[in-house]
Image (cartoon, rainbow, N blue to C red):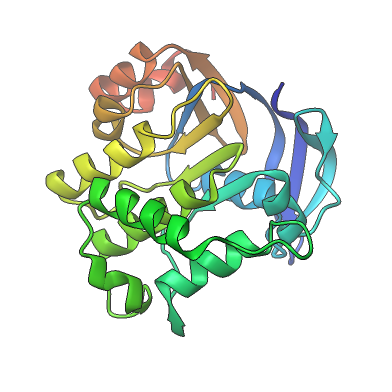
Amino acid sequence: MSLHIQNLHAILEDGTEILKGVTLEVPKGEVHAIMGPNGSGKSTLSKVIAGHEGYTVTGGCITLNGEDIAEMSIDERSRAGIFLAFQYPSEVPGVSNANFIRAALQARLPEGEEIDAVAYYKDLYAKMDLLEMDRKFTGRAVNEGFSGGEKKRNEILQMMMLDPKFCILDETDSGLDIDALKIVSKGVNSLRSPERGILLITHYQRLLDYIQPDHVHVMAEGRIVRSGGPELALELEQHGYDFLKEAALV
């Protein structure tokens, strides 16, 4: 079972084609990384998988564990097990972290079933401790007044609490100092499981020093142009993307 993307094409509202035939499979239990130059379509791919309304799929398919999710709403995809950690997490004024996460968990329970408050806070605090988050953050509005690193840790906290089947992290390392990067990576690594797939989108090898992928893919001009093992990221770090052009791959 896996996330399977086959010949995916997608356009912006103005008709500009961004994804031009992406094919990718991420089996559960594996961590895959996508790298590529700016404008190659990496972030667009993550948003299209999650169901962002700013893009229209014009061809291809997206299936999660054999189920076609291309026609699902954002909420339906989330309930099916997709979680997207944004590069720039949004603020939600007036809603505390604890209530926000609790409401998301409650929405996934069968009708009439209630969250056990004691068990919920025990689990929440344990995960906050792992992410080295002050427990006072439970009462603060979601991401409001948070630093960049605090927002990223909060995204990982939400992901850990919701326990999705498939995690997509869109440049989670962006703007993090080395200490925050290590903490965020520890949280992501805690979610590695034979039952969960993880897709990392990043520009830099440094994230992959802490979250070692099983496979690395390179995107350029809206397509996956090369795939390989972790050593591919090291090639990119050493030579940049020019070596792909020299190899006539883009």
Residue 141 location, quadrant: bottom left
Q: Is residue 194 above or below residue 33?
A: above
Residue 47 appears left or right of 11: left
> Which residue is more in the foreground, 146 or 141?
141
Question: Between residues 217 and 181, which one lies in front from this camera angle?
Answer: 181
- Name the residue located 76 percent from the left edge and 65 percent from the top edge: 112
Q: Where is residue 2, by image quadrant?
A: top right
Q: Position of residue 30 (x, y in %)?
A: 52, 20
Quadrant into which the C terminus falls: top right
Can residue 115 be seen? yes
Rendering coords of residue 120 (x, y %): 46, 58
Above or below, comparing residue 28 to residue 138 in the picture: above
Residue 43 screen position, x and y as percent: 53, 49
- Identity of the residue drawn at 52% across and 16% down: 227
Residue drawn at x 41%, y 57% is 155
- Horizontal and vertical percent for residue 9? 76, 41
- Whether residue 147 is visible to the viewer of this picture, yes or no, is no
Asked if residue 143 lies left or right of residue 46, the reply is left
Looking at the image, residue 237 sits to the left or right of residue 81; the answer is: left
At horizontal 29% and vertical 54% (from top left) the residue drawn is: 128
* Res 192 quadrant in image: top left
Number of callouts: 0
